[in-house]
Each structure stands twice: as structure tokens, then as C-alpha cells.
Amino acid sequence: MVQVRIMGSDAERVQVVARELLELVRHSQTLRHGDAETLSRRGTGARVYVDIAPADGDTAGPGDDVVIDAEVVTAPVPRRRPRARRALPPGA
């Protein structure tokens, strides 16, 4: 199974999105889901976790034919070169 985390700063909106997402998965013929649970809250926000798996029972494990395609969207932060420090005066 894959764990999906739905989180946001507005707890009510997180719950609405989680309900709608689970309803979509429930009607899917290719996916199934476990019980959604809210594990922690930050201030006014919420986090909802749910396990989702293929409906045919196939649970891909490490080393199975899993392809990940990712692209960096943000430019890398340029590294700052350290400044040369002045030597202490003699006798200091």
C-alpha cells in the first residue's frame, strides 16, 4: 500500500478534501483504500493519512518495476563562498 497524506492549515477544508478524495477512490475500479485517520494537528490545521492500493491486490515492493520521473522546478540556491578573514595584528 501507499500512504497518502492530506494536510493544510484549515482543518475543515482538509477534512472536506479527504472525504471527497476517499469518495473518488471508493468509486474507482482500480484502487482501494484503508481507513483515514487524523494523526496530528498543527495550530488550526490538520493532517489526514490514508493507505491506498491497487484493487487487484498487487502491492509493489522495493525492487519491483517502479519508475519515478521527477523534475527540479526551482533553481538551485547559489553557494556562498566564504569570505577571507583578516589576520590578527602581530602580538594580539
Image (spheres, rainbow, N blue to C red):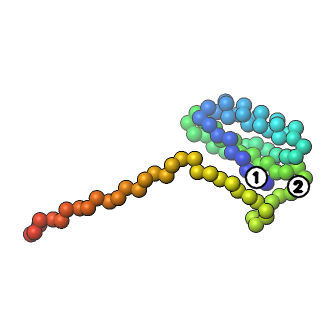
**In the image, 34: left or right of 89?**
right
Q: Give the quadrant of residue 24.
A: top right
**Residue type, mark 2 in image:** Gly
Question: What residue lies at 49% left-to-right and 52% top-to-bottom?
Answer: 76
Question: What residue lies at 69% left-to-right and 45% top-to-bottom?
Answer: 5
**Total numbered labels:** 2
Residue receiving disc 2: 57
Which of 79 and 64 lies nearest the eye of the viewer?
Answer: 79
Question: What residue lies at 61% left-to-right and 40% top-to-bottom?
Answer: 41
Viewport quadrant of the C terminus: bottom left
**In the image, 26: left or right of 38?**
right
Query: Which percent across, then down, holds residue 64?
Result: 79, 64
| Label of residue 19 in the image | none
Residue 38 is at least partly visible in this image:
no
**Residue type, mark 1 in image:** Val
Query: Which percent across, then down, holds residue 21?
Result: 77, 37
Q: Give the quadrant of residue 66.
A: bottom right
**In the image, 45: left or right of 32?**
left
Q: Is residue 64 above or below residue 33?
A: below
Viewport quadrant of the N terminus: bottom right
The local secondary structure at tag 2 comes to loop
Residue receiving disc 1: 2
Q: Is residue 92 above or below residue 35?
A: below
Query: Which percent across, then down, holds residue 11?
Result: 64, 33
N-terminal of the pair, mark 2 or mark 1, is 1
Query: Which percent across, then down, holds residue 70?
Result: 65, 53
Which residue is at the far left? Answer: 91
Which of 90 and 6 lies nearest the eye of the viewer?
Answer: 90
The local secondary structure at tag 1 comes to strand
Which of 53 and 74 lies nearest the eye of the viewer?
Answer: 74
Label 1: few (<14), some (14–19) or many (≥20) C-alpha neighbours in 10 Å: few
Question: What residue lies at 79% left-to-right and 48% top-to-bottom?
Answer: 52
